[in-house]
Image (spheres, rainbow, N blue to C red):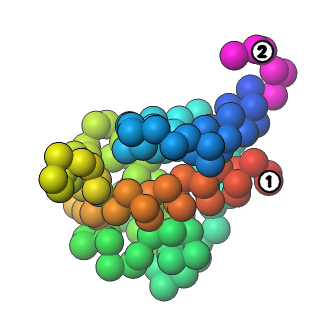
Amino acid sequence: MSFNSNFDRAFIDRSLQLVQEYTGPHDATLLLNCLLGLLIVPKESCLASIPKKPIEDLASWGISPSAITAFGRADREDEDPHNLRGLVWRLRNSVAHFRFRPEPEDGEVVAFHFHDKSGFKATVQLSELRIFVERLAKHVREL
């Protein structure tokens, strides 16, 4: 990777390109790696810009509202876990602290179970995760 003075943006662009172009057998690994990078690398500069869209609007970000089985409790006074920003924050905590596990079917990963210490729990299908990762990368890139 060549150096770019705007490392965050270059990282996001390359992650998006990887997700959009990859067609190999390790898509679950690629998606989880890109999700980790997109939730961790731009955290300080970008995640606060995630809109506080209602849970009903999650489908436009790729994740079915029914994928979330528990929102968990608010960790801070100003936080509402029942919106898109709350979901992104909880996914960030789950991935960053290795609180996820794959759901296999016929020897292939079809979904990931995510949870965090707040009580958040979600099962996201791989097809939904792909859309979410692309949408997250595009949102952060537009900042």
Is residue 77 visible to us here? no
- Tell me the residue at 52%/60% (across/down): 132
Q: Is residue 60 left or right of residue 33?
A: right
Secondary structure mostly seen in magenta is loop
Mark 2 closeness class: few <14, some 14–19, many ≥20 residues within 10 Å: few
**Label 1 or label 2, whichever comes before in sequence order:** 2
Is residue 99 visible to us here? yes
Q: Is residue 102 left or right of residue 49?
A: left
How far, Cα to Cα, is label 1 from label 2? 20 Å
Q: Position of residue 53 (x, y in %)?
A: 58, 76
Under mark 2, the amino acid is Phe
Q: Position of residue 109 (x, y in %)?
A: 26, 49
Under mark 1, the amino acid is Glu
| Residue interval drawn in magenta | 1-6
- Looking at the image, is 44 positioned above or below residue 81? above
Q: Is residue 143 left or right of residue 71?
A: right
Residue 71 sits in which quadrant?
Answer: bottom left
Residue 13 sits in which quadrant?
Answer: top right
Q: Which residue is mark 1?
A: 142
Q: Secondary structure at mark 2?
A: loop
- Looking at the image, is 10 positioned above or below residue 48? above
Q: Which residue is mark 2?
A: 3
Q: Residue furthest right?
A: 5
Mark 1 closeness class: few <14, some 14–19, many ≥20 residues within 10 Å: few
Q: Is residue 70 left or right of residue 87?
A: left
86 within the magenta span: no
Q: Secondary structure at mark 1?
A: loop
Q: Position of residue 43 (x, y in %)?
A: 58, 41
